[in-house]
Amino acid sequence: MQNAYPDYYPLFHCIAGRCRHNCCIGWEIDVDEDSLAAYDRIGGEMGERLRRDIDRSGETPHFILSEQERCPFLNGQNLCDLILYGGEDMLCQICTDHPRYRSFFSERTEIGVGLCCEEAARLILTKPEKTVLVTTGEGELDEEETALLALRDHLFILAQNREEPIERRMEQILTACGAHVPDVPLAQWAEFYLSLERMDETWTAILEALREHADELPLDDFAAYMKGRGTEYEQLLVYFLYRHVPTALDDGDASSKAAFAVLSVRTIFVLGALHLLLHGTFTVEDQIELCRLYSAEVEYSDDNMDALFNALM
């Protein structure tokens, strides 16, 4: 079996209680069958808590969130009582994996860390060197898989060509895939994102502000402001290509996946300009939070991703 991962992947570590946006808050956490069986064997007070705080009434068991949408095992210090009780082996599969994601080929598995995690976003965005894909093991890929990976390798080369401005690189990527991003006013894109499923009121407020201020954004000034931080957008572009181009194996449509990568980077750039307009500054931490929010609201909703891919076909 062949395995692949970005070279920054081994550096990822959860920052637990120091995280501003704990992944144990606001997300429904499913419990897999193996973990549920293990939990049922636990006795005492912890066993009682596990039986009380897992909803088994539906198709998929899940932890019952509090009124504040906190996992029942997230304590007041934002630490996991399950880990404190029995170590990381106590975690269910989704908690063990998050924010990791995987793409599966016939004899190849790719893994990465999702931008919805602030620490993963920090790791990706602050990497000054070009991202390198590390591949280990051996595996036979079919013709379609080989062609798709060859295409993505070419897109990586275009994305990381630092002799060209980032916008020119993105145009080259669209051309290489026969893809396009509709040339519509920013206010119309704001309306489109507002039409999608939304979870966080902060995201709604940002999109409404974009709709209101679309015609007054200081895009040229913002580009100059970000001149020394251009690698942030390169790393974003590589991340979106790495994560989403493999999904073309499901529908044969690599062009919409490349277009999504370009649209996402352009949108995040525009929202950075909006932040500068409204707040007079845009720090690396502001960028990390913006990217985390975009990912959580867009990438982690199947319905939203389908709507975007359809709009970009």
Image (spheres, rainbow, N blue to C red):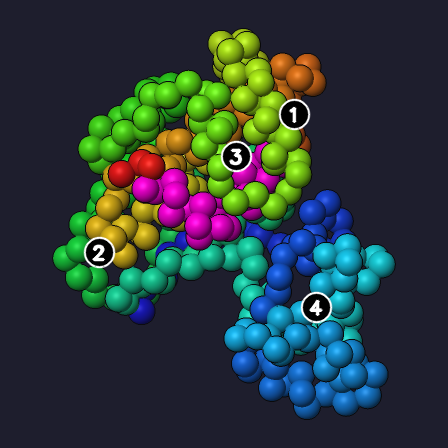
User: Could you tell me the amino acid type at mark 4?
Assistant: Ile
- Residue at image mark 2: 145
Mark 4 lies on a secondary structure that is loop
Mark 1 lies on a secondary structure that is loop
Work out whether mark 1 precedes mark 3 in sequence or the reverse, and give the earlier one. 3
Magenta-highlighted residues: 288-310
- Residue at image mark 3: 194
User: Could you tell me the amino acid type at mark 2?
Assistant: Glu
- Residue at image mark 1: 283
Mark 3 lies on a secondary structure that is helix
| Main SS class of the magenta portion in the image | helix
Circle 1 crowding by C-alpha within 10 Å: few under 14, some 14–19, many from 20: few
Q: Are marks 2 and 4 in contact (CB under 8 Å)?
A: no
Q: Is residue 284 magenta?
A: no
Work out whether mark 1 precedes mark 2 in sequence or the reverse, and give the earlier one. 2
- Residue 30, located in which quarter of the rendered image? bottom right
